[in-house]
Image (cartoon, rainbow, N blue to C red):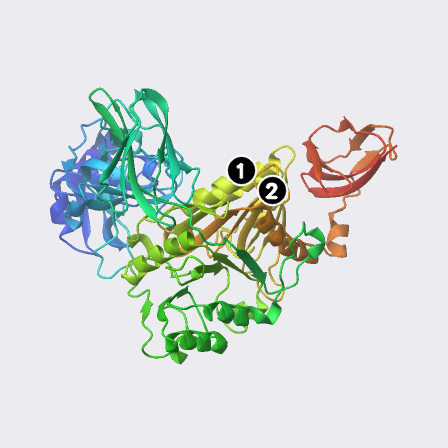
Amino acid sequence: MKKITILIIITLILQTGYSQNILTARQQGIGANVTVTGIVTNGDELGPIRYIEDGTAGLALYDLTTNLLLSGCVRGDSITVSGTLVDYNGLLELNPTSAAFIHSNNNVLPTPQNLTPNQIGEATESELVQIDNVIFNSGGSLFTVGTHDFTANTESGKIYIRNGHPLENSLIPSGPVTLIGISSQYTFFVPANDGYQILPRDSADIINSGNLILTSAVTQSNITTNSFDLSWTTSDSASTECNYATTQALTSNINNSGNVVTHTLSLTGLQPATFYYVQCYSVNGNDTAFSSIGIYSTASNSSGKIRPYFNHSVDNSVSTGVNAQNITTYFNDTIKAYMDLAQSTLDICVYNASDALIASAINDAYNRGVQVRYIADDDVVNSMLNSLDPNIPIVYRTPTPTAGIMHNKFLVIDVNSVNNSWIMTGSTNWTNPSNLFNDYNNLIFVQDQALAKAYTMEFEEMWSGFFGSNKSDNTPHDFNVNGKHMELYFSPSDQTTSKIHEVINSVDYTLEFALLEFTRDDLGDAIIDVHNSFGTNVRGIMESTNSQYSEFLNMTSAGVNVKSHSGIPNTIHHKYAIADADITASDPILLTGSHNWSNNAENNSDENTLIIHDHTTANIYLQEFTKRFDELATTSEINNLVDVEVKVFPNPSLGTVNIDSELEIKKINIYLQDGKLLRTLKSKSFDLERSAIYYLKIFTDSGYALKTIVVQ
C-alpha cells in the first residue's frame, strides 16, 4: 500500500510539473499532446463534455472513452489532465489520454468576463462569460433543444440548449436578463469563424433584472383587418402598456395604466395585411417588466381560398363535404397554372427541380415582365435551372454556413396584390418524375396577402445570404385568413419542433401523420403519450423506419398504430399531421410543409411549416391519409395480428366481458362498430353497453390481438 501511495504522489508531481497554462497549451495547435490544470466550470448539465479555466484561458475536455477518464469531475473541481488537442466543428477540445487527477473540490469558479455578444469569439472560447441586458427573441415561449437567438444593446447572439438540459421546456424570459454561460463554438464553416454560442448551465445562469417579470408569453388574438389584441401576465400587479410601429423604432404608445396581473390591450386603427413591431411592458412603481419586441400581422382583405392537391389516389368516402383532389400527373401543370397568374412578382424557393414544363412557366413569367427570383440548394443537381433565362437571378445556399440544406418548397405570387397574392407550400420537390409524379406528395395553395408577405420576408432574409442558423426569428406567426387561424414557422430559427409538439398535445380524439423522416425522441414520446390518453386514436405512416434513429420501433413497441412504408414502391415524401380532423367541437388542425421531424430540420436546414386550424382542410388531408393507411392494411397483416392465446368470453355476452391470457395485458382499446375509439383500460373484466358490437384491440407483451365481441 505504501508503494502505491508513493507512486500516486510521484505521478501527481510529474503531471503538475509538466502542466502548462491553458493559453500556452491552446497555442500548441491541433494534434499536440499537452497537460493542463484548471477549475471545472460545468457538470453533467452539458453532457459528457467538461470545460476548465485557469486564469489564462479555457479549454473543452471531451472523453472518447465514454467519460471514464473524466469520471467524477464536477463543477468546482481543480484537476490536471493530459491529452491530445483536436478540432470538433470549430471548438478546440482536449481528448484525455489518461484519467484526470482531482486535486480538490468546491473551489471558487472563475469570475465570468462581462462582454457584449460581438466580443464572443475565439479569444473567449471555453471561458465563463456574462452578457447584460439580454432579450431573447422568443421570450415567453419555452426553451427547446437547439439554438435560441437573443439581442443585447443591438448586438445579436445565440445560446444552445441540449437534450435533457435543466432549462429544457422552461419559460424563456420576456424581458432583459443577465446571461451567464460558457463561450463555445459549433460550425461546419472552414475556416471556423462563426457558430459562436453561449452555453448556460442551469436557471441560475439567467438572472432577471428586477422583481417584476413577465410570467407568460405575449399572445395575439382577435385579429382583424385593422386591429388585434395582445395579452400577457406578470408576477405582480402592474400597468398594461406597449410601444409599437411598423418599424422597430416603436414610435407609438398605448398606456392603459391599471394595476392587474393579467393584461390585455387592443391595437386599433391599423392597416390590413400589415406587420407591426410591438414591445409590451408593465410598470409597478420603479420596476418595469419588458417583453421582447414581437412582430404581429393584421388580417388581409384577400379571399383566403385554400386549395390542397395530391398526386395519388384519395378516399372520398370519408369526405365531409369537400372532396380531396387527386390530380396525378398534373402536379407540374398545376404549379404552372398558378405561376401563369403572376402579374408583377414571382419568388421561388425550392430545394430541387428538373421539370421542363415548370421551367417554361418561369420563363414565360419573366418574358411578360414579372420580377422573378429563385433560391435553390447547391448540394443537389437542380438541372431545371439550366433551362431558365440567364437573366433570372438565382441565389444558392452556398457557401454553406452550417450543416443542413435549403429544403423549402414554396413560392409567392404577387405579394403586393390583395386579390392575386398566392403562396404555395407542401412536401413536393419539382423533380420529374420522382417527386412530382411517383412519390406520394402534397401541394397546398393559399390566397392571402398577409401570409404572402410573411413568406416574402423569409425569402428576403435568405436572398440576402442568411441561411440556416444565421437566420433569426423575425416573421409573424399568427394569421387570420378569412376567419381561419393559421400559424407559420420557419426553421431553424423559430423552434418549429415545439410547435409540432403543441399540435400533438392539442389532440382530444384523433391524430394521423404521414412522414418521410421521424427521428425526434421528444415528438415520438409525445405521440406515445397521446396514444396512452383515454379516448384517443393515433395512426401513422412512416417511410424511413429502418434508419438508426427512427422512432418507428419506439412507437410500435408502445402499441401505437404506425405502419411502415419502407420497401414499397414510391416514397411517402409527406410531412403532414392531422389533429381531430372531423371533431368540429375540438380544434381540427392540418400541419404541413417541408419540415421532416428530425434534428437536422429543427437545427440546421431551411424549412417552412404551415399550421391550419380548419375542419375542411384537415378532412381533405384525412382523405389522402385514409387511402394510404388502408393500402398498407393487407389481409395477411391483419391475420398476423391475431394472437390465439388471448381469449375473450363469453361471446356473445350479456354485458360483462372477460379476457384470459398467459401473456401480460398492457392495454385494451375498445372501438365502436364504426371504428371510433370508445375507451382504453387495463382490466381483464369490464362491462359494455348491451345490444352492440365492439372491436377489441388487446395489447400484450408479445404483440396485440384483434377480437370482435357481441353484447346482447
- Across and down, in percent, residue 395 comes to 32, 68
Q: Quadrant of the C terminus?
A: top right
Residue occupied by mark 1? 506
- Across and down, in percent, residue 665 comes to 70, 34
Taking 142 as reference, is 519 above or below it? below
Q: Circles 2 and 1: CB distance less than 8 Å?
A: yes
> Helix, strand or loop at disc 1?
loop
241 vs 313, left or right, is left
Taking 515 as reference, is 501 above or below it? above
- Across and down, in percent, residue 366 comes to 38, 75
Give me the residue at 14% from left, 37% from top. 113
Q: Relative to the observer, which residue lies in front, 270 or 490?
A: 270
**Residue type at tag 1:** Ser
Q: Relative to the observer, which residue lies in front, 583 or 693?
A: 583
Decide which of tag 2 and tag 1 comes sooner along the chain: 1
Give me the residue at 35% from left, 27% from top. 215
| Cα distance in 3D space between marks 2 and 1 | 9 Å
Residue occupied by mark 2? 580
